[in-house]
Amino acid sequence: MTLLELTGVTASYGPVQVLDGVELTVPEGGSVGILGANGAGKTTTLRAISGTVRTGGRIKFEGRDIRGLRPDQVAARGVAHVPEGRGTLGQLSVRENLLVGAYLRKDRGAISRDIDYCLDLFPQLQDRVGSRAASLSGGEQQMLAVARAFMAKPKLLLLDEASLGLAPSTSKAVYEAIRRLRLESGIAMVVVEQNANLAFSLVDTATVLETGRNVLTGSSAELKGMDEIRRAYLGG
Amino acid sequence: MKIRNKPDGVLGIVAMASIIALSLSGCARDGAGQGNGSGSSPGITDTAITLGVTTPLSGPTAGPGTCTVAGLAAYFGSVNAAGGVEFGDGKTRTVDIKSYDDAYDPQKALSNFQQMVSDGVFAVTSGLGTPTNRAFREAAISQQVPQVLVMTGDPLFSDREESPWQLGFVPIYENEGAAFGKLLAESDAQHKVAILSQNDDYGKGYVAGFKEAIGGAANVSVVGELTYEATDTSVDAQLTQLAASGADVFFNAMSITPLVISSLQKAQQIGWTPSWFLPSNTSSPTAILQPGGAGAYPGIYSVSFSKAPQSPAFAQDADVVKFLADLKQYGNYPDMPAFPHCMWSYMVGATLEEAFKNMTEPTRENFMTALRDIKGLQAPLMLEGTAVDTTTDGQPAVSTVLVQKYDGRGYGTVENFG
Amino acid sequence: MPAMSSVLANKSTRVILIAVVAIALVVAPLILPAFTNQTLVRIGVYAVAVLGLNIVMGYTGQVNLGQIFFVGLGAYVTAYGVNHDWNIILVFVAACVVPGLVGLLVALAAARLGGLAIAMVTIALPIVGVPLAKRLDEFTGGSQGTSARFTDAPDWSGLYNDQWQFYIVLLVTAAAFLLGRSLVRGKYGRAFGVVRENEAVAASMGISPYRTKVLAFTVASIFGGASGFLYLAAVQYTSPETLSFGHSISLVAAMVIGGAGSIAGALIGGAYYVFVPQLTNAIDPNLTTISQGAILLVVLFLLPQGLVSLPRVVRRLFRRRTSRSSLPGNPPQNSPVHQPATDAAREGLEKTERQDRS
């Protein structure tokens, strides 16, 4: 069953058209990658879903139109966004950041269980749970951002450039953990990633955007083999 | 690096509490306020008496506020230099003035009052402001501390039933309005009057006094009456409307200095040049009339009970010469006073001295009795025909005012309108 | 192990400290001189106002320059209720609810505007409030103000008025601070912090920045109203001057000086608001504006985080000095062993302080 469906989604920043009819389908529990060069519209697509940019076209989530909802309303429907640049709250402690993620939840007991789960998933955070998020390293902040999004118990996780600015070994560890999270929780994901290798480690299918339009869509296996992809995005 | 801008919770509170405790310890419960058993009230010894003034010394009313301290300090500075005041109990005491800034904030005025009680002040006097004086009036009553000869036109302070420990000094608003109304009613000519007043008790007081005085007069008719709010920044619309009424007399009960100046300018711009009446606190020749170009009008009238030091008529007056010298030497006020409050507080000093001379016991009760028994005192700087009279219930210490006419530099008393 | 024992030590010290402070607060008015009690009462009044301001400005990051309006409104409602012989509990509730409702309405409109527009709207409140208070004289007593005495000590208590007022103010202030503390440490407090730091992130967590701002603003108004009730309990008189714009700015200064985003800072801010005019009056009553400005600048330069950070700054200085002086004093082979041990213990202590907050 389809969880999320984007049809002919458009968006512009002022006079600049950024999305020009983007299509995207995410099945329940599925994981879809969005690939593309800088400025292709990857991040904007995520923003369109989470309601932080004005868009045209149709965005259906669980069969209902969510286009035009405010970001907090979209979040309340079960969409968690790990934004580019992480958006961790530097003045709050790691634990507080996690609690913020669970803001909409009422199940108190489960919340503390999920915090423990996050700390197990990202053991680096374990020691820093009382520290301010601002004092964390880049990799730890990224982990925190992912963990915080998970704390919302979303149906869909939007992951934007989780490897940005991280050392290769750190990015790898982050993606390892996200993959484990996906396996154990079954949360559906939309993954935006410059590094196609990392992306393919996490997604079932992917679409390639160019200047706000889909130019290629297929399964990871298909896309991985394609020369164009290799040349354009695998650092070839 | 770890940055924490969150507080150290309890620690902070404890730290603060100990700071408070440390900074305030050292006085005992019975130390202040309740007298000390020897029969004399706090703030008075065999050699000195301490008076307190809470008044605006900062903020928009700091100008007149500073004057309420300067005149008093000038008067008693001179008296102390001559040895002090010989009280009715035979002891000679110097008079110390403690001043406190309330910035025209009622809460601070109360705080200052409480501080004065704690500092051992005998009586509170001379302070300017209706809300600030009202803020501690009831506290003064319940602690039986005199709050006398204060600068407010609020009649409440002169109501003996309501305010047993209070007495106002300056004429109430009605007194001023009535004095001008009376002059107009006695005029031989017909007059059409336009009234503009501040929409509060100040403006209403003036208008009520004025209207009562012209009540039976056939020669005076009110042809226009408008109000404005104390927060308005312009009254141009009202002036234009009143000008159209063709009035030859303009009764302007306005307490805001810049508004009075701009009104004086605006009316002549639109070609309306009636005779004006202005309240005593907004008729200063240097601060208001000269910048307002008052020379364009046939007459600017105000009321006063005080000689105007700026006026050439009083330049050689003995009172004025001594006053200006005292003000400079003891009042820390070297300039020509821009506000009448400097003169008024000087007269407050003289009135207090008179009460002290009649005090037979060093107590506040006895002081109040002595203070309420002054009649016909011609304090220095008082105009011929006015006097301090503290014996009439419902009236402040000074209730007679004389109508004055602007002569281009200062004011001179007039008997007749025109 | 050292971390564990310092947790226990820290916790029991806290309990003892709280108990000592509580007992001191109850006993203090009985032994302190009247003027001290009166001063403490006024500190309570303004601490509650600053606390409200801190919630909307310090914690939620929304500039509010109109807090004094709600204090004044609370004071007027209290005066009106007292003079119409309402039950005192009802008066208190009304003094909180009426400003709260007005704050809610203003916030519903203003929070949509965002950024500096909120600040502009809040500036307008006291500016409109003063003439309004003058004009609505059947409710407010006009420019002559209105008195309401309801806090004179009853005969059965055997207390002086200042002592009785102290207990009233202590009761309300303590309740306000406990409420404020649990609010900012709970779920909504976190939401405030998130909105202050990053509205986009807040929205992505399902926290509506708009509703959160409205909530913070309304809570601030309620605290303002409670402060107004206390104002009347302490001053027993209010007039349009009470809600003049300048006092609103002084409240903001007091909040920053005390410590923005800090509950204890609000209390210190209240103390600052009351003490500094008294102090500057003692220095020279003719120079209060200048000396107040000087004090403000000195505190902000030395303690940009506010007075609440003073213990921390002192501790840091002290620590730096001891570690510096211990180096040459100790035999060289000792210091490497000695130093890390104290560091670890300190680390443990700081961590528990932080954890206690969440």
Image: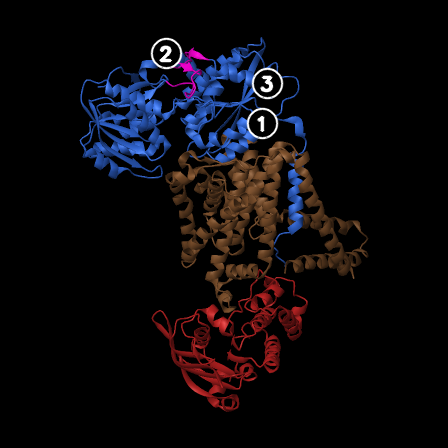
Work out whether mark 1 precedes mark 3 in sequence or the reverse, and give the earlier one: 3
The chain letter for the residue carrying disc 2 is B
Q: Quadrant of residue A23?
A: bottom left
Q: Secondary structure at mark 2?
A: loop
Q: Circle 1 sits on which residue?
A: B117
Of residues B3 and A47, which is closer to you in this image?
A47
Q: Circle 2 sits on which residue?
A: B317
Residue type, label 2 = Asp
Q: Nearer the viewer, mark 3 or mark 2?
A: 3
Q: How many other residues sit within 10 Å of disc 1, few (<14), some (14-19) or many (≥20)? A: many
Q: Secondary structure at mark 3?
A: loop
Say yes or no: labels 2 and 1 on the same chain. Answer: yes
The overriding secondary structure of the stretch rendered in magenta is loop
Of residues C328 and C193, which is closer to you in this image?
C193
A219 shown above or below B211: below
Q: Colour of chain C?
A: brown
Q: How many other residues sit within 10 Å of disc 3, few (<14), some (14-19) or many (≥20)? A: many
Work out whether mark 3 precedes mark 2 in sequence or the reverse, and give the earlier one: 3
Q: Which mark is residue A102?
A: none
Q: Would you say C39 lies left or right of A207 here?
A: right
CB atoms of marks 3 and 2 within 8 Å: no
The chain letter for the residue carrying disc 3 is B
Q: Nearer the viewer, mark 2 or mark 1?
A: 1
Q: Circle 3 sits on which residue?
A: B44
B392 in the magenta segment:
yes
A198 shown above or below B221: below
| Chain identifier matching the blue colour in the rendered picture | B
Region of the chain picked out in magenta, as a range: B374-399
Q: Would you say B273 lies left or right of C225 here?
A: left
Residue C253 in sight from this viewpoint: no
Residue type, label 1 = Val
Q: Colour of chain A?
A: red
